[in-house]
Amino acid sequence: MFKQIDLAYDKNALEPSIDTVTMETHYGKHHAAYTKNFNDAAEKAGLAGKSVEEILGNLSSVEDEALRRALRNNGGGFYNHNLYFQTISPDGQRAPEGPLAEAIDRDFGSFDALKEKLASLAAAQFGSGWSFLSADKDGKLYATASPNQDNPISEGTGRIPIACVDVWEHAYYLKYKNLRADYIAAYMALIDWGIVGENYARVTG
Ligand code: MN
């Protein structure tokens, strides 16, 4: 049984950057629906005992096309939102440290350059989708964008996402309307780079 992560903060704790009503619908309705539909599809596919990473990384083994699509969309929605809500906090560490900081400098030139890249990828994503910071087993970092609920795992890159920006309109439209770039800046300012560093250590460990 796949479970949404428990929020480590109250739904009103990210005000004014992320408003309470958006948190209630995004986490309580959208993320909850992806989770339920993913559980249903995984059950139907006989994959309920697998990890979400295993399922998303082996979609081609699911022969039924509708079921494969359901796993990709809802498994991605389940996974991506867990990461999205896990990696922000009202009072987190606002810059990377240690091995993650070193890898960011090595692969992007600077922390500011990475933030600029993640933000511009998110802003430029046409329609619904995400930008991701991901890492491979050797610790190399990648900033990319994906449409819909895809991610570097379901795209078969072998990389694991460690931070993300959701640019589906449900993530920001209630408060920011068409001002996607303002939402992106507000979300990214809430990222807890200590948690992202823990994610990075898990991928490379
Ligand atoms: Mn979303």
Image (spheres, rainbow, N blue to C red):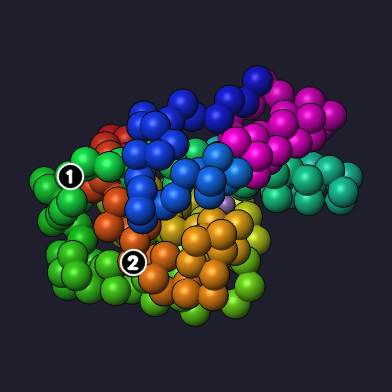
Determine the residue positioned at 75% across, 36% down.
Answer: 37
Q: Which residues are magenta?
A: 28-52
- Circle nearer the N terminus (1, 2): 1
Quarter residue 168 falls in: bottom right
Determine the residue positioned at 40% across, 39% down.
Answer: 12
Q: Is residue 149 above or below residue 145?
A: above
Say which quadrant the C terminus sits in. Answer: top left
Residue 81 in sight here: no
Q: Amino acid at mark 1?
A: Gln
Is residue 175 within the magenta segment?
Answer: no
Give the left or right position of residue 136, taking residue 154 as reference: left
Quarter residue 132 falls in: bottom left
Determine the residue positioned at 70% across, 38% down.
Answer: 33
Whole-percent x, y for residue 164 in the image: 42, 55
Instruction: Sort mark 1 into few (<14), some (14-19) or many (20+) by Cα contacts within 10 Å.
Output: some
Q: CA distance from mark 1 to mark 2?
A: 16 Å
Circles 1 and 2 in contact, beta carbons < 8 Å: no
Give the left or right position of residue 173, taking residue 204 as reference: right
- The front one of 145 and 159 is 145
Residue 185's disc is 2
Q: Is mark 2 within 8 Å of ligand 1?
A: no
Say which quadrant the N terminus sits in. Answer: top right
Give the left or right position of residue 78, taking residue 166 as reference: right
Judged from the image, the secondary structure of the residue bearing numbered disc 1 is loop
Whole-percent x, y for residue 181 in the image: 41, 74
Main SS class of the magenta portion in the image:
helix
Whole-percent x, y for residue 43 in the image: 79, 26
Q: Amino acid at mark 2?
A: Ala
Residue 93's disc is 1
Q: Is residue 169 above or below residue 90?
A: below
Residue 41 in sight here: yes
Instruction: Sort mark 2 into few (<14), some (14-19) or many (20+) by Cα contacts within 10 Å.
Output: some
